[in-house]
Amino acid sequence: MTMSTETELKLRLDPAILPKLRRHPLVTRFKTGRPRSQLLKSVYFDTPDQELRHRQLVLRVRHIGRRRVQTLKTEGIILGGTRMRGEWECEISGDQPEPEGLRATGIALFAGNATPVARLKAQFTTDIHRTTYLLSSDDWDVELAIDQGEIVADGRSVTVCEAELELKRGGPLCLFDLALTLLQDIPAEVTTATKSDRGYDLASGAGPAPAKAPAISLTADMSSGDAFRHIARSCLEHYLRNQDCLSVTRAPEAVHQMRVALRRLRSAISVFGDFLATPETLGLRRDLSEVLGPLGRARDADVFQAEIVDPTAPLLSGEPGYARLCSDIARERRDAYDEVMTQVRSARTALMTIRLGRWIEAGDWSLDQSPDMIAARQRAVGDLARSALRKRDLRLSRDLRQLDRLSAEERHQARIQVKKMRYSIDFFGSLLRSRRIRTLGALLAQLQDRLGYLNDIAVARRHLRRLADQSQDPERLWTAGLIAGWQAARAEALLGVIARDWKRYDSLPRKWRVTGLDRAAGKAEEIDTDPGRPGSGGDTSS
């Protein structure tokens, strides 16, 4: 039994580009010896209720000629687009997993009498032709594996064409640098989806699902630099998981989550701005804006369809211009999605993703040795969190106290402040000890959604007018007016609900105290959001 940790970066490729990849100057310059080709059949096992998958474990038996190699892998962690995971390998005598090898991993699931080994069944198989190149320099060794084949489950199959850069010696930054060199000439998508991820999706028949943002866990004494890296890794993982989903399904929720991921990252850059005002950061912010443009247009098209037009169908679908107007809207939505798909599959987006991953791990912000930058990076994140939360809370209170007097544009700007406050609570929530922190987060989410809906109505009014004007069709114009009027009535009613939501949020005392910062002074270490204390007058729900 051998245990190791693999660190790899994966690229999804078009099969037509493989000859160019094999002849790429980087490969011919750094390869050591001749490439090795293998036919690899792997059978992946799990229990009927997928207990291994739920525990973030992957078990396979690989057929290499007459040899059988049993491998158990952990889900691992994603760092800037690379994946680090533990794996245990041993040779076995047959085609079925052997309990002794699983027990030898030391993983509690396979110890004792409750082990699920007897219930393991084949879930799916992979048949892969692999060509492996060992790339070497004085500082690193990297294995380039080019895989082409298919995954098969229950009579269904999906093709595989990907390249993996696996670190054998040296630091992980070389993976980013090699990928950046390849992507200058080789169009590809950066992906975090493993063959086992795709196999389970195929076996379920459902395809990959959109993913929400991973939970963030910080400690108050963590440095601000380390905390930012932790948050930024989470944002990039969130983006990449949903990009993988979008590539297969074109799911609207995947577009939404990709957009949320990049907006959260921009918000984190703002919060940690004391040490992120660098040339590389400025360039990446421009890249993020470029990617967010098509995502925003696709998301706007989804919202316009689902929130503005579809609710009016029971009342207005009989209007003469309704079907023609809906056809125009559907066409624009298809065009927006085509733009997103082109962008996601572009070399420019892949390069941006790799540059972003490298910047998170070792960007210029982390290397600046000026005293002010060092002090800003080393500042305890608990101290920064308290300051950032207070600052954003004050800004939010200023923007929303006169909510009923705000114009549509001012309400839109207020929503942006609500969103930034909500993201900050998501980033730093693990540092705050409070019975009410979930209430605060839920109220902010409600405010964000409802203010967002008001903005959607304002945008929709302009959109409907443009569609009607372009068509020069009186019936379309009439239908667009009916939709706009119906939504305007809803907006008027919603203003009162938003005012009540804000009053409830504002009534909660918020001192933004952070666990661990004031223990030396013997102070209470929790955010004060208890509305039941004398004089608070706040909400008492949990």
Image (cartoon, rainbow, N blue to C red):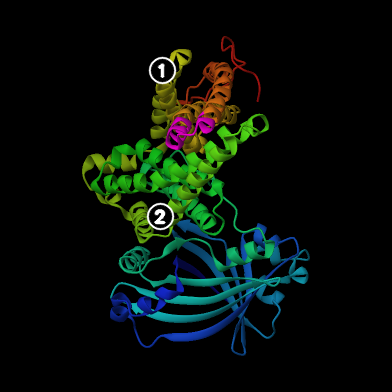
Which image quarter: residue 198? bottom right
Disc 2 marks which amino acid? Answer: Gln
Left or right: where does residue 334 sit relative to residue 378?
A: right
The overriding secondary structure of the stretch rendered in magenta is: helix
Q: Which residue is at the front of the view, 499 or 122?
A: 499
Find residue 348 and report its horizontal and vertical position in percent.
34, 58
The residue shown at (77%, 68%) is 119
When the figure is inspected, residue 503 is found, relative to residue 122, above or below; the finding is above
Mark 2 lies on a secondary structure that is: helix
Q: Which residue is mark 2?
A: 343
Left or right: where does residue 127 sit relative to residue 293?
A: right
Residue 520 visible (yes or no): no
Q: Which residue is at the front of the view, 383 or 165?
A: 165
Q: Is residue 519 magenta?
A: no
The residue shown at (64%, 70%) is 59
Find residue 87 and report its horizontal and vertical position in percent.
55, 69
Cβ–Cβ under 8 Å for marks 2 and 1: no
Q: Is residue 464 magenta?
A: yes
Image depth: mark 2 or mark 1 in front: 2
* Marked residue nearer the N-terminal end (2 or 1): 2
Q: Which residue is at the front of the view, 19 or 73?
A: 19
Q: Residues within 10 Å of mark 1 (few under 14, many from 20)?
A: few
Disc 1 marks which amino acid? Answer: Arg
Q: Please provide the residue range marked out in magenta.
A: 463-477
The count of marks equals: 2
Residue 488 visible (yes or no): yes
Find residue 209 and report its horizontal and vertical position in percent.
60, 53
Mark 1 lies on a secondary structure that is: helix
